[in-house]
Amino acid sequence: MSGVGEVSGANRYLSGAKLLEEAFSAKEKAYAPYSRFRVGAALLAASGKIYRGCNVENASFGLSVCAERVALFKAVSEGERDFAALGVAGDGEEYCVPCGACLQVLAEFNPQLVLFLANRRGESVEKRLDELLTAVFSLDRQKVSSNASGNRQGLKIKNSPEGA
Ligand SMILES: [Zn+2]
């Protein structure tokens, strides 16, 4: 991937450290009275702006939203479409890996998004989104519009191991 949103070289270390600092700050805003597992996310857009998110739980558990999607939706609603990297900080002993739903939503905008994932002690690991989510659901809009009868020919899976 190229463009202003690219994270490389010396920028990579600085971006990771900065994003995780922002993610830890975002975690302090988490609304997690049910799980008590707080998560903060910080998403770096190509514009250079960083968008923070925290998990927002609900008494109707299924309505809860993860920190990663909160950050992404904030950014997209501000007009951002190009993202370089995401920092995620959780309350656990393990590196805070985004759930499958968040990976899918993030992949819509950048399947090669760089991820900096931290545990509660601030130790971190760097991953790429397509390492964690190897097959992304994708709609081919043109085929869908020409197959309005609703059959599945308009749907395809990108990066499928079988090449489907
Ligand atoms: Zn999630």
Image: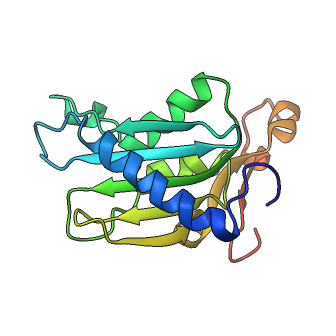
Q: Quadrant of residue 66?
A: top left
- Measuring from the top left, give residue 151's x and y in whole percent: 73, 41
> What residue do we see at 80% from left, 37% from top?
141
Viewport quadrant of the N terminus:
bottom right
> What residue do we see at 27% from left, 56% from top?
90
Task: Please tell me whether residue 4 is drawn above or below residue 133 in the rendered image.
Answer: above
Task: Please tell me whether residue 28 is drawn above or below residue 110 in the rendered image.
Answer: above
Viewport quadrant of the C terminus:
bottom right
Q: Nearer the viewer, residue 24 or 157?
A: 24
> What residue do we see at 23% from left, 34% from top?
57
Image check: 76 left or right of 39?
Answer: right
List the single residue furthest toward the top. Answer: 78
In this view of the protein, can residue 135 be seen by the observer?
Answer: no
- Measuring from the top left, give residue 93's x and y in whole percent: 20, 70
Task: Please tell me whether residue 56 is drawn above or below residue 106 in the rendered image.
Answer: above
> What residue do we see at 57% from left, 48% from top?
106
Q: Nearer the viewer, residue 89 or 72?
A: 89
- Measuring from the top left, give residue 144's x and y in whole percent: 80, 37
Image check: 130 left or right of 72?
Answer: right
Task: Please tell me whether residue 30 is drawn above or below residue 15 in the rendered image.
Answer: above
